[in-house]
Amino acid sequence: MAVVSSETIPVVSEPDIVMVRRRVREESLRLGFSLVDQTKVVTAASELARNTLIHGGGGYMDLITLNGPRVGLRLTFNDKGPGIPDVQLALRDGFTTGTGLGLGLGGAKRLVNEFEISSSADQGTRVSITRWK
Amino acid sequence: MEKIPILRMGEFLLVTIQVDMHDRLAIALQDDLTNRISQTGARGVLIDISSLEIVDSFIGRMIGNIAAMSRVLDAETVVVGMQPAVAITLVELGMSLPGVKTALNVDAGMELLRQSVNDNKEAEYGSRI
């Protein structure tokens, strides 16, 4: 898979979530995503960035554009937080340890084509999503 | 600190969200609106979200909270102008905004507010006539 461009965006404060949404919007628009696909990937990014900030205590997002054989956008959220003890449980709708509705992880997964998560107490949490054009 | 303006029009309050809100701004709007309903005795709140390019679970929850709080304070809330792509995404995310009245545009939203406020008045006074 050909990586066309790559950048890292910090996620350490609330305005950073807005910045994540803006950058993901710009890149998905540049790649020629439909309006609905742009909206889906921006919304998924917003959910995951908020998880990184609130549950992970901050971290960063890697934004990679892929070109060939398929065009797509891959976003990876990394934090050094306490990790998620039970990932399957956390993916279920309605599961929440915070003040949200518990739609973040499961909802983000439904909005993208590929979803990978790895989490442990000593490594923190890494969530990678890909949306193809 | 930046703030989202709340306009008063008769017995209604109007809000147009025109910026990509960070979470604290969304919470501030929720608090401001609740205070204004209480201060003014407004009977209805119209929230225009036609400029919003995404509604994630946080903003969705804020909209649901405003509708619930205004109902407790005897006011109706109508959300108008949601973009189709936002509606598709919101439902797929798992949020269908239960308990939130919606209309396609500001005109339809104002009509809905007037109707429901009149219905409420009739329900209050109807039995005495």
Image: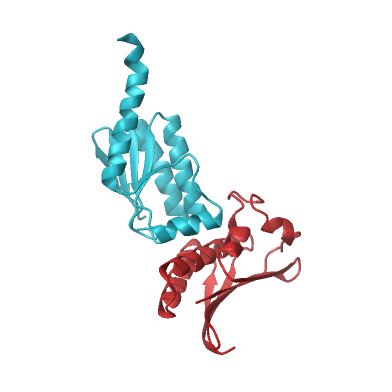
Q: Position of residue A81 (x, y in %)?
A: 68, 65
Q: Is residue A66 shown above or below B70?
A: below
**Residue drawn 47% across and 37% down?**
B68
**Residue drawn 33% across and 57% down?**
B18
Question: Left or right: A49 with respect to B109?
Answer: right
Q: Position of residue A20 (x, y in %)?
A: 48, 69
Find the residue positioned furthest to the top: B128
**Residue drawn 49% across and 59% down?**
B89
The colour scheme used to paint the residues is by chain
Chain B image colour: cyan
Chain A image colour: red
Residue B7, by quadrant, is top left
Residue B10, by quadrant, is top left
Placement of the N terminus of chain A among the 4 image quadrants: bottom right
Of residues B106 and B66, the one drawn nearer to the viewer in this rendering: B106
Residue B101, by quadrant, is top left
Question: How many numbered markers are drawn?
Answer: 0
Find the residue positioned furthest to the left: B10
Question: Left or right: B73 with respect to A41?
Answer: left
Q: Position of residue A106 (x, y in %)?
A: 63, 59
Kindly tell me whether residue B67 is visible in this rendering: yes
Q: Is residue A114 shown above or below B119?
A: below
Kindly tell me whether residue B54 is visible in this rendering: no
Q: Position of residue A103 (x, y in %)?
A: 59, 54
